[in-house]
Amino acid sequence: MFAKFRQKLPGPKATAFWTTAATLVTVYRYNKRESTRLLDEYKQRASHAALETIGSLDTPRKVHVYVAVPMSELGTRRARQHWEKYILPVFAAGALDYEITLVNETETENGVERVIRGGVHRLVADEIKDRRRRQLESEDDNEELRLWRAALDERKAENERRELKNKLGVEPGMSVFELWKEKEYPGVMDIVAIGRETWIEVVNGVSDGAVGSLNMEIPPLVPLDSEKSSTPEPAKPEQTSGSEQAPATEKTPATEPSPVSEQTPATEPSPGSEQTNTNQISGSDQTTHMINYDRFDNHSMVALPAVAYIGHKNLTGWASVPQRIFNFFHDQQNVDEYARQALQVVYESTRRGAHGMEEIEAMGREEEELESWRDQPSLDIVVDSRVADCLQIYDTQNDNAPPLEN
């Protein structure tokens, strides 16, 4: 009887295979259950922020999320998946409004595509500089800047209309133009940087925007497609065949453009001459006008956005394969780390002043030890001491958010 029963039992190899398969499936199912439980716990903690009441005249909080291309990548796909998996659910549970910007700038040189860094830096700096310019324009003694702002807004509106006309092929109606134009947030949006690369560009951009030059150039008019097609092409010289040579034409040396036509400085309009100022920049599309804000700048510090760092350990290369396999069966550690960091951003109470340049430089430094950072151009943090002293950050390295109520 026992002999027949033993013959039906699987052999040692089959037993080892099914035991290993059952163990892996069990570990994977346990990881999924624990990851879901941890994420639900952080979502419940964030949901208390959604129940907080605000005044009828208060502006709801909104953060600006920046995502740069991770190291050793040519796109933001992995960073976007990281955002959607670990961070977005917590923001949604806390009813935290956000605006996300994915910055992906590449160029091809000698057949090799590479990433161009600095896009996040430029966007953050431009936003803060524009706020500084508008603060100068609001002062009573700066009527000239207000006149130039009116001319600049008119030029931007005309360029937007021309760009939309090039896309649609017809003159856009007013309703279409207003729908296409994005509305500006009335307050100051705090900034969320995902990954060490984005963090470096964000803090550098905040410093540049706070103390950098405010001079700006009025953009030229965007040419319409109809204007391009109506431009006559230059006549091509007739080609000769055989031994006949075309008569040599005397080359006329190129005349050097005069300094006035190359760049015309902005003239100082008199008060009440807004119409003259507008006509001045619309008369010639090729003339460059530089608005000199620096001579009005009193170097007062504007309200800077608070900055939050959320990690993103991008695992690439063959050396990262063991860690990626481990994360596949033990992902709850990533959920616990990234969802906890996102929770700190939901609650404004976790915001505090940065502890000097040491803390700013140390934020996310462990990511530089990953395989994806090897043989990559170094990124340095360059922050003015005045900005470092007043910069506000979210304490994402500790869990100071309100605990879950039983």
Image: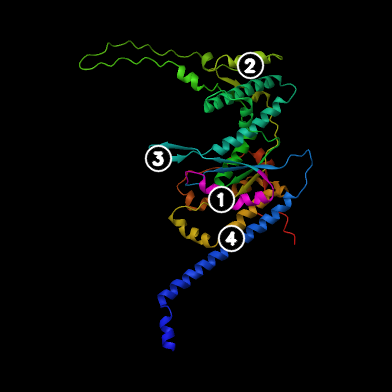
Disc 1 to disc 2: CB gap under 8 Å: no
* Residue shown at 64% from the left, 51% from the top: 342
- Looking at the rendered structure, the kind of residue marked 1 is His
142 displayed left or right of 323: right
* Residue shown at 50% from the left, 13% from the top: 258
* C-alpha distance separating marks 2 and 3: 45 Å
Against 298, residue 35 (above or below) is below
Is 14 inside the magenta-drawn segment?
no
Please tell me the numbered disc located at residue 112: 3
**Location of residue 8 in the rendering, given as x and y in whole percent from the top left corner:** 42, 81
Disc 1 or 4, which lies upstream in sequence? 1
Disc 1 or 2, which lies upstream in sequence? 1
**Location of residue 63 in the rendering, given as x and y in whole percent from the top left corner:** 66, 42
Mark 2 — residue?
278
- Looking at the rendered structure, the kind of residue marked 2 is Thr
**Location of residue 25 in the rendering, given as x and y in whole percent from the top left corner:** 51, 66
Against 45, residue 27 (above or below) is below
